[in-house]
Amino acid sequence: MGKPTGIIRVCLVGAAGKMGQETARALGQATGIEVVSAVDRAHPGESLRAIAGPRAPDLVIQDKVGAALDADEANVLVDFTQPGAAANHAESALKRGVAPVIGTSGLSAQDLRDIAQVCAEFDTPAMVVPNFAIGGVLMMRFAQQAAKWLPDVEVVEMHHDQKVDAPSGTATRTAELIAGARQGQPKRGEELIKAEGVRGGTIAGVPVHSVRLKGLVAHQMVMFGGLGETLTIRHDSLDRTSFMPGVILAVREVWSRTGLTIGLDELLV
């Protein structure tokens, strides 16, 4: 375990889920990367290749993260599970000198503080990535730039109906970046709210609206309003393959970082 000196050895957690399967196929074909273990508590003992297809590694799925890390000497853990589990998996990996790349959204601010603390304690890096799509990362960057000049803004994020957390990690991160970039919050007039929740929620002073519908994958609009003009920055992931270049980038670069890194933005220079 520790920093790779050759092939990057990956433990994939949540391997039988939709994102896990796509990741198994992508990492299975990536140069310089080897998936050495797959974990999914709902499918222990099953073949990852039988679930994810012939491009996935030929591995038997395990049910315990710690045991997989101890047995298979991974350098990087990639996690697509649930928020509570992902935070625990990250800390378990860090204590073993394995760098976690967390794609699970919904981690709390306390989760992030805890992960950062364990990173420092065990001198092992970690990445928490709200959105692996390169276009999604650029969308957040452009929104941050626009907020300096157009502080009136609302975020609308749209996902498939099986996404359990709302708002999305991408929307949360976008709102935080906007809040840090703009000069104060715009003043709004008094509103007559006729239905609870109709105006969405608020993150760091930025209104955020969540839509969950069949047929969607992952979509977000950042809508700015100015004097006599509007600006809309939109990103659409039409298929989960859109996330794979970012996953591969994170796996390759996580050990070049120090401490906890949030998002891929710093890697896109």
Image (cartoon, rainbow, N blue to C red):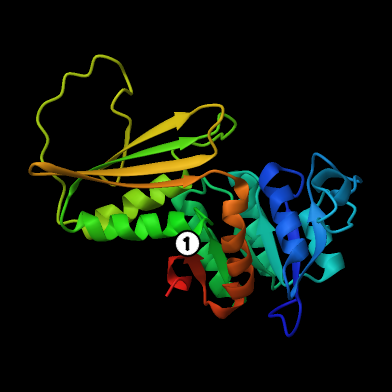
Left or right: residue 34 versus residue 105 is right
Left or right: residue 227 versus residue 22 is left
Q: Eyeballing the image, is 209 above or below 184?
A: above
Q: Eyeballing the image, is 25 above or below 123?
A: above
Question: Dot 1 surroundings within 10 Å: few (below 14), some, or many (20 or more)?
Answer: many
Quadrant occupied by the N terminus: bottom right
**Can residue 215 be seen at all in this image of the molecule?**
yes
**Whole-percent x, y for residue 50 in the image:** 88, 46
Say which of 55 and 84 sits in front. 55
Q: Quadrant of residue 211?
A: top left
Residue type at tag 1: Gly
Q: Eyeballing the image, is 167 above or below 104?
A: above
Quadrant occupied by the C terminus: bottom left
**Can residue 14 be seen at all in this image of the molecule?**
no
Q: Eyeballing the image, is 222 above or below 68?
A: above
**Whole-percent x, y for residue 258 in the image:** 52, 77
**Whole-percent x, y for residue 59 in the image:** 88, 56
Say which of 227 and 70 sits in front. 227
Say which of 159 and 182 sits in front. 159
**Residue located at (62% from left, 43% from top):** 82
**Residue located at (15% from left, 24% from top):** 191
**Whole-percent x, y for residue 167 in the image:** 43, 38
- Please identify the residue farthest to the bottom as the structure is shown: 5
Q: Quadrant of residue 98?
A: bottom right
**Residue located at (16% from left, 47% from top):** 185
**Residue located at (49% from left, 53% from top):** 130
Q: Which residue is mark 1?
A: 263
